[in-house]
Amino acid sequence: MKILVPIKRVADPANANKVKVDDDATKVTSEGLEWVMNPFDEWSLEAALRLTENAAEKARVGEIVVVSITPGEGDTDHIREALGKGAERGIVVPAGTDEQLDASVVAKILAAVVKKEEPDVVLMGKQAADGDSAVAGTKLAELLEWPVVNYATNIATSDEGKTFEVKRELDIGVQTLKVEGPVVFTSSDRILRPDSIKNGVTPDDFEYADLGDLNSRLSNLKNIMAARKKPIDTMTLDDLGVELGVGTEYVKFTLPQGRSGSAEFVETVDELVQKLQTEAKVL
Amino acid sequence: MTDVLVVAELVEGEARKTTLSAVNLAKTIAEGTGGAFDILAIGAGAAGAAEALTKYGARKVLTAEIEGDYICEKYAPTVAEVADDYEVVAACASTYGKDLMGRVAAKLEAGVASDISGVEVDGDDILYTRPMYAGNVFGTLKVTTETQVVTVRQSEFDPAAEAGGASPVESVDVEEDDVAEKVESLGIEVVKSERPDLTEADVVVSGGRSLKSAENFENVLEPLVDALGAAMGASRAAVDAGYVPNELQVGQTGKVVAPKLYVAVGISGAIQHLAGMKGSKTIVAINKDKEAPIAQVADYFLVADLFDAVPEMTDAVKKAKG
Ligand SMILES: Cc1cc2nc3c(=O)[nH]c(=O)nc-3n(C[C@H](O)[C@H](O)[C@H](O)COP(=O)(O)OP(=O)(O)OC[C@H]3O[C@@H](n4cnc5c(N)ncnc54)[C@H](O)[C@@H]3O)c2cc1C
Ligand SMILES: Nc1ncnc2c1ncn2[C@@H]1O[C@H](COP(=O)(O)O)[C@@H](O)[C@H]1O
């Protein structure tokens, strides 16, 4: 099975409250913050690795290509990191500025990459932690005329990705689906539970560790060395036959007003309940 | 004059309240530009659901009957076909709205203003505001394509009020795509609760990892939830640990709530949790660690062990409410 994993480079979301807006309010500036792999994409990458390995034998049984559309010259640190975790190849598409990369153009670029690479699956984040728009995956699926399963928590295949049984989280409950590949998946927070991924190769009784956010394949020295030898191809917009051109235009950015004051510390439950009644008037 | 199409969200043959948040947006745009808005009820039981939607001042209510569980591949062709006659197509930014509208937008080659928290009609422009960076920046944008696709954040758009009168109902043809044949829904386990819906409740009580088990959620937290007539929420850590189902997650990747009162019990207040609740009017934290980051947004902070404080508070609330 060949999986394409799109990853975005974002300003460290754990410090999103340090993001600033420049003087004329037309740009978000994240100076001083590290660039990191979008956490939602990091989860998808780990899920993709689980789909393409025999975990019991620590053997790869498929191929993962990561692709990132990166502004300007096309920074590749986050792609190297993905290769260090086990992906086979990387593709960087240097293009435009962050403002110019809205979901419309991202989906178009990814669709062009899919046509070249012909993966069985695209496995991506449900949203980018900077823009929080959650649009690119579904748009991509439509451009490809593929099905999409958003917010997947469980992905199982027993025929190398020809068909999948999938669970996904909706606001109203959990939906179970059967889907024929090729397909686009976006992953939910729960995609890395020990039993979330079944690929028909890793023995059914194999248990992945419960990782929470962080995944096991931290780039250790050996992996980093190996990753240096893995290829990262550059594809330009010309190569892909895509023109920049977005469907949205930001006219300004503002920082939210902080909440009124700092917390009032109370010592007892009685004091709290009394304040909620007489001060806040919410009881 | 901007005409707006609202795509209703149906569950078991009834429009969810999320629909009325999108109607609110549609009204604002239609009134601001001298246009009109219509509502499309699509899915199983659309004709029945339409009746209740005729009361909100829409020019007309359209219905498209599609049997079976929702999947976006089945709905998108019809929505896109109908939407072609409108400048703006809107839905709520629920999982349904986000799932469906991306596909619709791609069909219409439309830009998307996703999960917006505000709208302003400024001459010929419609300016949308939306939270980004987990609510740490607000961006104001225009959608520059012929059709504008918009999803609205439910906590920021009050449900539209009834407008008197009754909109006429018309059915539309159902369009189909081959891709829909590749997907089959084996079922949706719709979770039902006696409590108010998380995104609609006036009071929300959320529990974190510190509750330690599903049993404690039930025996310790739920009595307080019910004493307050509240909806129950949770941090992602509590959902991941399996203490409560995913529908209860509040935050960047869960639901966004803005009740009158939000009580965070044993929740540290990670940036991603704050993204889902810092718009609440009054915020109470119960936490044994005074330094927990939830203090940045809390109005009242009770420094206590939740296993003592919560049962005590349950009694005090019952007494206070008589
Ligand atoms: C991309 C991304 C998206 C995320 N999305 C979300 C999201 O949507 N929603 C969300 O909630 N999180 C989200 N998270 C996770 C988030 O970063 C935190 O890990 C999570 O919110 C922590 O949950 P918690 O507060 O329950 O647990 P903890 O951080 O472990 O905090 C437990 C708190 O309970 C207190 N405590 C412990 N015992 C007691 C006691 N007996 N009495 C009183 N207090 C006690 C502790 O002092 C501590 O403050 C996301 C993370 C990432 C990376
Ligand atoms: N510049 C990018 N390069 C690669 N993938 C991207 C890029 N932007 C978005 N994506 C993918 O699209 C997903 C959804 O992004 P968005 O719709 O922008 O919230 C992300 O989780 C990524 O997998």
Image: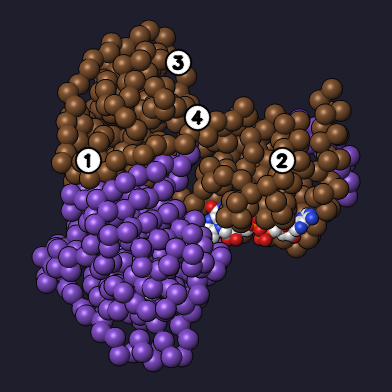
Chain letter for the brown colouring in the rendering: B
Q: Quadrant of residue B23?
A: top left
Q: Secondary structure at mark 2?
A: helix
Quick one: label 3, few (<14), some, or many (20+) residues within 10 Å? some
Q: Secondary structure at mark 3?
A: loop
Which residue is disc 1 drawn over? B180
The residue under label 1 is which amino acid type? Answer: Ala
Marks 3 and 1 sit apart, C-alpha to C-alpha, by: 36 Å
Is A260 displayed left or right of A271 in the figure?
A: left
Q: Nearer the viewer, mark 3 or mark 2?
A: 2
State the scheme by which the image is colored.
Answer: by chain
The residue under label 2 is which amino acid type? Answer: Glu
Parent chain of label 3: B
Quick one: label 2, few (<14), some, or many (20+) residues within 10 Å? some
Q: Nearer the viewer, mark 3 or mark 1?
A: 1
Quick one: label 1, few (<14), some, or many (20+) residues within 10 Å? some
Of pointers 3 and 1, the one earlier in the residue sequence = 3
Is residue B52 visible in this depiction of the protein?
yes
Q: Secondary structure at mark 4?
A: loop
Chain letter for the purple colouring in the rendering: A
Q: Nearer the viewer, residue B3 or A193?
A: A193
Residue A282's x, y, as percent?
73, 32
Label at residue B158: 4
